[in-house]
Amino acid sequence: MSEALPPAIEVRNLVKSYAGVVAVQNISFTLNRGEILGFLGPNGAGKSTTMRILTGYLPATSGEVRICGVPVAGQPDAVKRHIGYMPENNPLPEDMRVSEYLYYRGRLKEIPRKKLSDRIDDVLDLCDLTRVRTRIIGKLSKGFRQRVGIAEAILAEPPVIIMDEPTIGLDPHQILIVRDLIASLRGRMAVIISSHILPEIEVTCDRVLIINQGRVVATGTPGELRRDILGHSLYKLEIAGDLDALPAVLSAVEPTLKIAEQSSPDPVGFSTLRLVTDRDDSIGEPLMRALVSDTRFRLRGLSREHPTLEDVFLAATRRTWDIVGTPKSTSK
Amino acid sequence: MRHFFTILSHEIRMLLVSPSTYIAGVLFLIVMGLMFTAMLEEYSRGPVEISPAAAFFNIFPVPVLFMVPLLTMKSISEERRNGTMETLLTTPVTTFEVVLGKFGAAYFLYGLLWASTGGFFYLLRRFAGDFDTGPLIGGYLFIAISGLFFIAIGIFASSLSRNQAVAGILSFTLLFALLLGTYFARDLQILNHPSMAPLKLTLENAQVLQHLGDFSRGIVDARQLLFYLSGSVLCLIFSIFGVEAKLLHS
């Protein structure tokens, strides 16, 4: 990662609108070479649109995108030599053999004929496809098809790989294989992946970008996001008694401790509460002592929570809907 | 242009490994063979003025109207429907190369099918003795040149819709208008009005059946060549626009 090279992807104030609908509003981000970026967002957030603009397939309405320093709008052909792209749903021709397909794609990507067959052997090996190299693509299982798509994307060894939902529809075992495959690209290629499967992103990606309704909601490493959006630490409390008196007790233990969420009491009278605090170190012991010694409360459980990216994602997207002011139905 | 040959050879290869190509070829030869036999029956009954080759090529609109839409309708529609257009256009390939490659492959198959009817004339010559070969060469030349335009029309129709059936019907309609529509339209009374003179002239010169007659008689008119070449270039340019417009508005 030398300083002289321009960043792999540079996006500034990107806007895309279709026939009056704004799909992407003012997105900006930068991705360094060799980094893996996770692109998160609910359906219709503008993930696929942004990725298509990055590849030069769709023109942007305004804003600037540079891939390895090359502007996409000005030199789309040069940009296409720098990227490997796997679209949503991974479209593949049904009636070709795996090795034939890779050969054809390799020729289109201008890999010299001499190097191509060695390179195909390499990617087949890397993606564990050697067994199926002579099979017809249309007859392969979903996991194999997905890996054929990834093999195709990395075939020409481009500095930037863009994959739209590479793990969609795979079983856990296949997801593991695909995840390892993506992780193995770290350091060599800059990768953008979009996904709904949040633990995937958390394990694989160096950085995460959450977008909702066409805007960037949050960006950073998974750890940073947790802290920024959810507060520093989370505690889960199961308690019964006079809950109105609880905030005073809590602030006596730690001034920044607040109730973030409160459920209605279960049949036995216990409510589940989530507490947030800015403190990074554990305050479990003083908190427990204070609550147990107070006779107004009955305590059943107290634990420190490790928020998943899912919580961050839900909190972040909820926050934008509050800003935008359109409470959508939460079916997705 | 380097990708043109990659795409062309890929497309031709896909045609040659697909069973539907051979089925289409066999059916085409059966239909053409039946027509040829019926024509020979006519000759055996009594003297006929025109040469057998000229008579054979007179029925060319029938295979063209059915074959061209079937050959071309899936070329671009299917890529778009499967989403493989997206992967294709995110490689360093231009729309021009894609359209031209598809066109080349469809034209190759079209030419191959027509060339296979040459066997009929070989048999005729072998068993029925000599006949005038001039109209034969003229006829095949006409098929080769007009085919460029017809296939380009089919490709254009295919670039407009992601539905193969719609593309097929559209190219059938366009071909019908060009082959037979111009023939019927030229007798319309309204064209005799002085203000319609340019339109009448255009129609007079766009008589495809008339062109076939000229070619069979050995007349190769530069205006007719230009008509087919410019028509095919225009259709291919519109196909490129068709593909790109769908990207802008997708």
Image: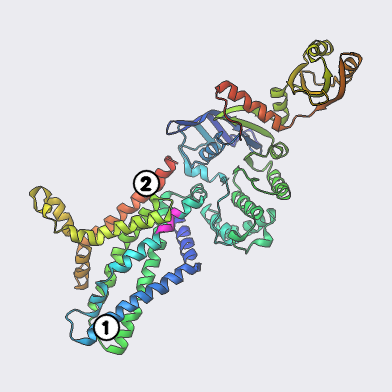
Check disc 1 and report its element: helix, strand or loop.
helix
Q: Earlier in the sequence, mark 2 or mark 1?
A: 1
Give the x, y percent position of residue B192.
9, 53
The kind of residue tagged 1 is: Leu
**Prevailing secondary structure of the magenta residues:** helix
Residues A194 and B130: in front is A194
Q: Is residue B202 above or below residue A164?
A: below
Calculate the distance from the C-alpha at mark 2 to the C-alpha at mark 1.
Answer: 46 Å
Q: Is residue B152 visible?
A: no
Both on one chain, marks 2 and 1? Answer: yes
The kind of residue tagged 2 is: Phe
Left or right: where A316 falls relative to B53: right
Q: Residue beneath label 2, please?
A: B241
Residues B2 and A5: in front is B2
Q: Is residue A266 above or below residue A199?
A: above
Q: Are marks 2 and 1 in contact (CB under 8 Å)?
A: no
Q: Residue beneath label 1, please?
A: B40
Residue B75 magenta-highlighted: yes
Query: Residue at the location (64% across, 62% down)?
Result: A133
